[in-house]
Image (cartoon, helix red, strand yellow):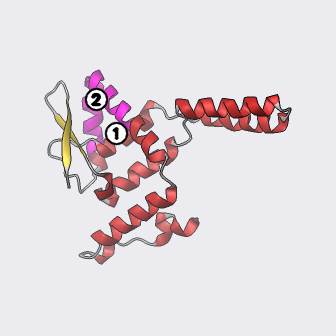
Amino acid sequence: MITSNIYTSNDGTNWSMITDWLNVPAERVIPADLAVNRASMGLTGTRLVKAFEEIEADLNTGNIVNAYSKFDQLKKRVADIPDEALLVDIACVFALLPDEDPHDYKPSLNAQKIQIWQEDEDCRFFFIVKAVRYIIELSDISDDVIRMHILQRHLMESKDNPNLIFPLAETGLMNT
């Protein structure tokens, strides 16, 4: 798996990240996917402008019910814009410590990452911005594509270990 150095924090930690997300093990994709799903209710600037334009168009044509419905949806989505803790959760998945195995996601390392980020504001900001960009990039990919990717990766990795295969219901493919 190819990783690249992306940042050096004040304490000298050389951070890296996986360069090709299509080759990421399911152990990393799954928590990232879950966090992105939680964050997907957030809006980018472009989406926010488009939403207001749609509401304005409905108001200009007298379609008050449609405008109110869209406004209500927008209000709920704005309330769910991801907070910093969620962005940190996402960053913990893709930011790798120097001795971290990119194939094996260990949530226990998250505390160490967060501790470094709390002591180095520039580092924390760097990874929060990366997480926002990651959400925007992945939010344009359908859930089915992400689920298929997770299933394919898991099936490929399970050839040597049949216990790694998890049922379709767990991938969400049976729920679509």
How many neighbours does mark 1 have within 10 angstroms: few (below 14), some (14-19), or many (20 or more)? many
Rendering quarter of residue 65: top right
Say whether residue 150 is visible: yes
Q: How far from the left and from the top, in percent, is residue 67?
A: 78, 34
Above or below, 21 against 121 in this view is below
Residue drawn where x is 62% and y is 33% of the image: 50
Say whether residue 79 is visible: no
Q: How many labels sit on residues?
A: 2
Local SS, label 1: helix
Left/right placement of residue 45 relative to residue 152 reads: right
Q: Which residue is mark 1?
A: 91
> The disc labelled 1 sits on which kind of residue?
Ala
Q: Which residues are magenta?
A: 109-131
> The disc labelled 2 sits on which kind of residue?
Trp
Discs 2, 1 touching: Cβ within 8 Å:
yes
Rendering quarter of residue 116: top left
Local SS, label 2: helix
Q: How far from the left and from the top, in percent, is residue 105?
A: 28, 53
Q: How far from the left and from the top, in percent, is residue 157?
A: 28, 69
Residue drawn where x is 36% and y is 54% of the image: 29
Q: How far from the left and from the top, in percent, is residue 100?
A: 19, 48
Q: Which residue is mark 2?
A: 117
Q: Quadrant of the C terminus?
A: bottom right
Q: Is 144 in front, or is 123?
A: 144
Residue drawn where x is 34% and y is 60% of the image: 26
Q: Quadrant of the N terminus?
A: bottom left
Residue drawn where x is 50% and y is 60% of the image: 144
